[in-house]
Amino acid sequence: MSSEEEADSHAPYSDKLLRKQKRARQRVDAGEPRNSYSTLATNGIAPARAALMSGGLYSAIFEGRQHFGLFGPGYAPAEMLNELLGRTTKQDDNGDEANGGVIAHRVLRDILQSRNKELLLSSDNNNVLANNNNDEPKTEKRSPERPCSHDSRPDLDNALLSLENPGNSHASPPPAPPSSENLIAPKPEPEDRDSDAQRSSPRPLDVKRARVENIVSTMRSSPAPQQPQVNGCKKRKLYHPQQHDGAAERYGTSHSSSTHTVSDDSEDDGERPPIQQKLVEKNALKSQLRTLQEQLAEMHEKYVQLCNRVGKESETVDNDGASSDVEQIEESIPKSEPASPAKELPPPLTNTATPKMFSQVMNQMMTAKMHAQAVGHPHLQPGFNGTLPMMPHLPPTDHMHPPHPQIHLNSAAAMYLNVSQKLFLEQEARIKEAAEQQQNNQQIRPQSNQHSPQQRQLGPTPKPPLSSELAERLDALRVNTGSVGPISGADLEGLADVLKNEITASLATLIDSIVTRFVHQRRVLGKQSEAASAAADKLNKDLMRAARLIDRKSPTPKPPERQMPGMFQTPPKPFGPLYGPMNGQFERELNPEQSEAISLVVPSRKKRHKVTDTRITPRTVSRILGEGVRQSPESKFPESPSPRPYTGLPTAVAIPNPSLHESQVFSPYSPFFGAGGGLARSPPAAPERESPPLPHAPVLHHSELLMSAHHSSPDYLRQHARMHASALHQSQMMMDGQDPHSDCNSTDLPYDGVQPTSSTLTPMHLRKAKLMFFWVRYPSSAVLKMYFPDIKFNKNNTAQLVKWFSNFREFYYIQMEKYARQAISEGLKAAEDLHVAGDSELYRVLNLHYNRNNHIEVPSNFRYVVEQTLREFFRAIQGGKDAEQSWKKSIYKVISRLDDPVPEYFKSPNFLEQLE
DNA sequence: CATGTGCCTG
DNA sequence: CAGGCACATG
């Protein structure tokens, strides 16, 4: 019928069977359409999930992930997409950037003024989006219709839509059926969405969308001076460098007045008398602090307003506000962003230069702050987790304590926190710098001169005053410094305390209000809101799928999926901390087994390159595991929001678009109930919404992984960086050694300039592939290639890699079937009662197989997938379907839809090394 | 024909 | 895991 499946199953099937008989094989699926799984999945689910999302706005925005594919069935008219795309591309190509830039500018401004919050939120998304735009074209060829990124737009659309009519979101799109249903649903999936058909109304929405896009891109570019390097660095670069520049310039100019003093100081340092400088600085700082504070308040206010408006607002989006406001906002928000890709600004050296002392203090402060917040707003904490890891100079150990995973983070709050945090950090950095500067000036003027100018440029933003107290503190400090000399630790500490208090206080208020708002909003949104967070999770996946969908046109449009009430609702997943056991170990054992693996392969046709990882025999492993897995306290929180780089299209589309990643700080993770070992039964009463856990980035045990990830994945870095103080940001950049201004290179180097060096897949690659299996069960070869940038692919090794995954799947399904049967034999009646605990046998086996050395924490989604798979098998077996020849086929299909994007850090050249 | 996928077997 | 085969799709 609608799906290809049907096609084969019917007519062809008979033939097939006949043939099969020859071999006596019951081919469940031999020859399934290549990507049939993914395709189907994509189409069907995406819409549903999208719908699920509450209004999309919140989820989309808050989640910060990029959901490209998400077109509600009803929206995202092809035209719109085309328009957008066309615009984007063309402009880029033509060099119309200027126009775009201008527009973007305006939009940006508007947005900033009217809705800071949105901006913030969207900025994340934007990043992703922008990235997409940048790279995709090539890979995307698949979809003739629209070669370019279909991606980002949809999100925007949704967001816009939601904004316009919050309540409608579900209306237009098909009702969002619970994911589980989709899964189960035989297949009547409707998928017309990508066929453009429906969308043909160029409404204000489009305009808005366009605007938003521009804004976003602008924002994005600005904040992330780091070039938008897309791993594949496809063709396009950011197109707003100019805008950015313009903005920066503007910004600089306008600021100059305010910041003037400071800048002058820095520049003229040498000549000016220290005292004068001090005074000037002091004043400047004071005013800046104040400004900052005000901004915070302002932002909050705006946020609130925004929240209120969200429902109705359709036009508000654009308001041209005073440039001044914009500037302020800019300052506060993208603080480090000033550096535009354009490169007019010199690379930021500023913060980096700061002595360790400062950083330490900052760290301290941050930590304290976090704790305080955590106490006050437990649910918010998660947001920080994501961010923390990102701080380069912070010692991983101290700062990374993930807050309790269970805490549900309010996304809105999180966003705010991030912003606040950023501001805070920035401010701190500035203050410190200033202090330091003074010190230096007094002692050695030349030094200060050197970096101050740059500072200025980079962060022209005046430092707003935090509070009078703070200002006083600073002043005192300064005075002391001036007269006494070096700043004492005590002083700094005091300052830190003050700052902490200040910020904490303001943040607390802010957060509270935000949370309240958010909650309220959700309520308003209605049912969708129900599981905004949960929905968000799904959304991600859906989006991904949708994206895929877009790439390939669906053979036959399928009718929209309908909810099948109650059909197979699965209980909320009890995953959670359960993971603990698995994650815990960080130690990565070094087992250099590679010895011979690298031997050159002689091109003899059938030679097998065995890459098998022999290092540990399964038995050994099991033994070890049996002995108990130790987990480090820190790793207990699987959900730690370490942002997970999100790749838009997991499988089908080979788009090396690193941008996706949205860090998702919010983990709408629902509370986890630890299930006992093995298959546990959950109380029937369990809330029924089944929301797949968000695809969170698993927490890597080694900070190095993260770091490496950063190196390799600019996007990833960017995203995180965005949330941190510019200082951090900059320092990171420096660490990376990347030129912030450099755009994506025209070269298509996979990543970071990593070039394929060998065509031989080593045991390490195998290991990596296994780890990847946690995210993707059905990766396309294109995706695989993307994730193995160091491999020079040819047919053989590509096939080998593909084969690996085939083998992985085989193993996986065998286990699933086995455990499903076991559950049945144990008398389990309801599939919903099947749960996979972190300590279950099944889980252990799987972990052993794919993650022997616990190199990474198993992503929560994998657990979800496992559970779903298990349930599918369970149901099938229970229903006697296993008697049918291809009974597994349907299961495979379901599972194939559950692929998630593989974290960007897998592309990192360093990743392999980490796996030793 | 190239690719992709599954099933079996070694 | 890898080989091979059968089968599917573009």
Image: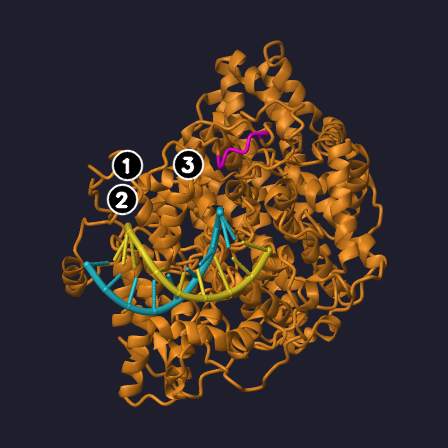
Chain colours: A orange, B cyan, C yellow
Label 2, label 3: how far apart the Cα atoms are:
18 Å
User: In the rendered structure, are the residues bearing label 2 and label 1 in contact, judged by CB atoms less than 8 Å apart?
Assistant: yes
Check residue A749 for magenta coloring. yes
Kind of residue at disc 3 = Lys
Residue at numbered disc 2: A607
Q: Percent from the top left, x then y, of residue A905?
A: 43, 45
Residue placed most toward the observer, A816 or A110: A816
Quadrant of the frame with the N terminus of chain A: bottom right
Label 3, label 1: how far apart the Cα atoms are:
14 Å
Q: Relative to A732, is A265 above or below?
A: above
Check residue A347 for magenta coloring. no
Q: Nearer the viewer, mark 2 or mark 1?
A: 2
Q: Which residues are magenta?
A: A745-751
User: Residue A361: which quarter of the image?
Assistant: top left
Quadrant of the frame with the C terminus of chain A: top left
Q: Percent from the top left, x then y, of residue A601?
A: 28, 36
Residue at numbered disc 1: A601
**SS of the residue under disc 2:** loop
Q: Which chain does the residue under circle 2 lie in? A: A
Horizontal arrangement in the rendering, residue A396 relative to residue A122 (left or right) = left
User: Residue A176: which quarter of the image?
Assistant: bottom right
Q: Residue at x 66, y 66 (%)?
A: A517
**SS of the residue under disc 1:** loop
Residue at numbered disc 3: A792
Q: Residue at x 33, y 64 (%)?
A: A810
Q: Which chain does the residue under circle 1 lie in? A: A
The mark found on residue A867 in the picture is: none
Dominant secondary-structure state across the stretch colored magenta: loop
Q: Percent from the top left, x then y, of residue A158?
A: 71, 61
